[in-house]
Amino acid sequence: MSRVYLDHNATTPLRTEARAAMISAMDVLGNPSSVHAEGRVAKGLIETARAQVAEALGASGCDIVFTSGATESAALALAGRGLHGADIEHDAVAAWITPDLAMVNGQVQIADPAQSCVQLANSETGIVQDLPQGVAVSDMTQAFGKLPLAFNWAGAGMGLVSAHKLGGPKGIGALVFPQGTDVAAQIKGGGQEMGRRSGTENIIGIAGFGAAAQAAAQDLADGKWARIEKLRIILENALADGANQTIFVGKENRRLPNTSCFIREGWKGETQVMAMDLAGFAISAGSACSSGKVKASRVLKAMGYSEEQAASAVRVSLGLDTTEAQVLQFAQAWLKAEKRMRSRAA
């Protein structure tokens, strides 16, 4: 059975450009903190990748600090700051904020941007927020590479990003912020990454991140995500035609082009995931960091959905290699399983 991967918000396939950059970096001998020729070559790889990420993110003139991923970036940006946010943030961010901001129709209501942390796009629902100027921190992980984005114009003081969401390797991310911003190091030692994050840099991962960011920016400029958005519409129309009780979360909102979160009340999300897995399709029942926990989605409950509705949601997230045939095959398989569920419940 040929499997179809529809869980790209959890992680994406490694891009060929990233793979090539990583293989090349494996042959670089020097420690980037060394001043000899070998060390300068290694340092050059890091600075090239830093420039690639900055350009792709629209963050010219900003500092890019490489981390082990967006989770570490969140800790670096948020520790000790006591910022406020809504209860739709990723767990990595929710651990550091007070979730007391209200929402109206999926949009976070922000009274004091300078004391707020607001994601740009939600990993579960795909809903895109309208960031106000001056918001302290924004998790841009899911939006980076999928939406036209210029950090310099987004209005955020700091941004969190991760490589494996746009075709880079796992285990590498970054924190971006304007030069001169005071960022207290959480990992101290040799003073690498401009003194913000000590430890010998992951040269291979960083090289892959830079190459992936550059390629993702080109795909976005070429309009490739517009095709994926059309596939999402085809998917949702097929599901709605076959099961008109299906609720599509955020359908009236601006969403990521690839993300569809839908609810079939009375059919547990984890049961749907297992049924689709057996049918050859990889989907999820929430963000990758929480989908293994059998409980209703915190994000959906925060948006006003009932406990049962929140427990009956799944997420399909398409990738640049997803085809219309695969989308229709999934819709057919899901509707077939949904029909069996209704028959058993009758």
Image (spheres, grey):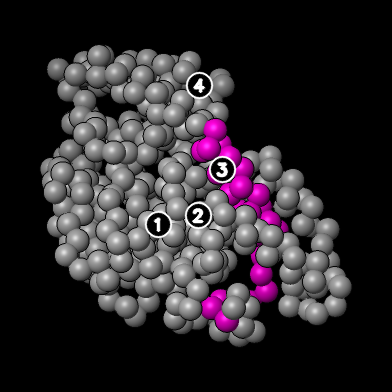
Q: CA distance from mark 4 to mark 1?
A: 33 Å
Front-most of 66 and 68? Answer: 66
- Badge 2 or badge 4: first in the primary sequence: 2
Residue bearing mark 2: 58
Residue bearing mark 4: 323
Circles 2, 1 touching at the beta carbon (< 8 Å): yes
Residue 315 in view (yes/no): no
- Badge 4 or badge 1: first in the primary sequence: 1
Which three-letter amino acid code belongs to the residue tagged 1? Trp
- Badge 2 or badge 1: first in the primary sequence: 2
Q: Is residue 244 above or below residue 91?
A: above
Residue 34 horizontal side relative to residue 224, left or right: right
- Badge 4 or badge 3: first in the primary sequence: 3
Q: CA distance from mark 2 to mark 3?
A: 13 Å
Q: Residue at x 83, y 58 (%)?
A: 27
Which three-letter amino acid code belongs to the residue tagged 4? Thr
Residue 199 covered by magenta stretch: yes
- Residue 233 in percent (x, y) is at 34, 23
- Residue 32 in percent (x, y) is at 74, 72
Q: CA distance from mark 4 to mark 3?
A: 18 Å
Which three-letter amino acid code belongs to the residue tagged 2? Gly
Residue 55 horizontal side relative to residue 21, left or right: left
Residue bearing mark 3: 216
Quadrant in which residue 94 is drawn: bottom left
- Badge 2 or badge 3: first in the primary sequence: 2
Q: Quadrant of the C terminus?
A: top left
Circles 2, 3 touching at the beta carbon (< 8 Å): no
Select label 2 or label 3 by which is in front. Answer: 2
Residue 26 in view (yes/no): yes
Q: Is residue 139 above or below residue 336?
A: below
Residue bearing mark 1: 153
Q: Which residues are magenta?
A: 195-222
